[in-house]
Image: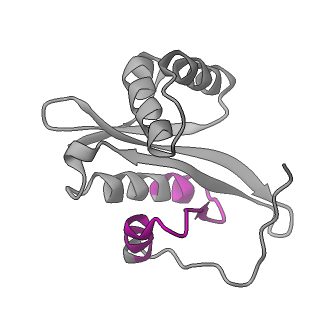
Amino acid sequence: MSIKKAEIDDLDSLAELFDSYRVFYKQESNLEGARAFLKERFLNEDSVVFIAYDDESKPAGFVQLYPTFSSVSMKKSWILNDLYVNASVRKKGFGEKLIQKAMGLAEETGAKGLSLETGQDNVTAQRLYEKIGFKKESNYFYYLSI
């Protein structure tokens, strides 16, 4: 297993993973759309992506982080927005290693922290997050405007 910060050269491999991630969340497959979306993230430097490769150098998973800022603490913070590991390599530590890489980025950049959200029914992910040390937030309400 190896994990590296993704670069534009990783776009094709990353687009396939990203498309699978979206399909997992019940979106229609759109490989070209995934590629265009990720390319824009790279070109605009909107996000940081780490990509994991298995022992055969095949793309196995990724994590995508977006920066945000806290006015109260006057610090940067990171949103772990996307995490995906191919079904064929799940339960082999890829997810945990990708999250640890994300946590390392937060530390390296002096960020206040790293936040994420997941569905109430995604119990597997919740167990992983709690195992790594994430705490479920209970002091705030989150509102969405559609």
Q: Quadrant of the N terminus?
A: top left
Is 84 positioned to the left or the right of 141 in the image? left
Q: Residue 79 falls in which quadrant of the image?
A: bottom right
Is 98 positioned to the left or the right of 60 in the image? right
- The residue drawn where x is 46% and y is 56% is 104
Is 24 positioned to the left or the right of 58 in the image? right
* On screen, residue 46 above or below 104: above
Span shown in magenta: 104-130
Residue 69 locus on image (x, y percent)? 77, 55
- The residue drawn where x is 48% and y is 27% is 29
- The residue drawn where x is 84% and y is 49% is 146
Determine if the magenta segment contains residue 114.
Answer: yes
Q: Residue 24 falls in which quadrant of the image?
A: top left
* On screen, residue 72 above or below 24: below
Determine if the magenta segment contains residue 110.
Answer: yes
Residue 60 locus on image (x, y percent)? 28, 38
Which is more toward the observer, 139 or 44? 139
Q: Residue furthest bottom?
A: 139
Which is more toward the observer, 20 or 80? 20
Residue 131 locus on image (x, y percent)? 37, 76
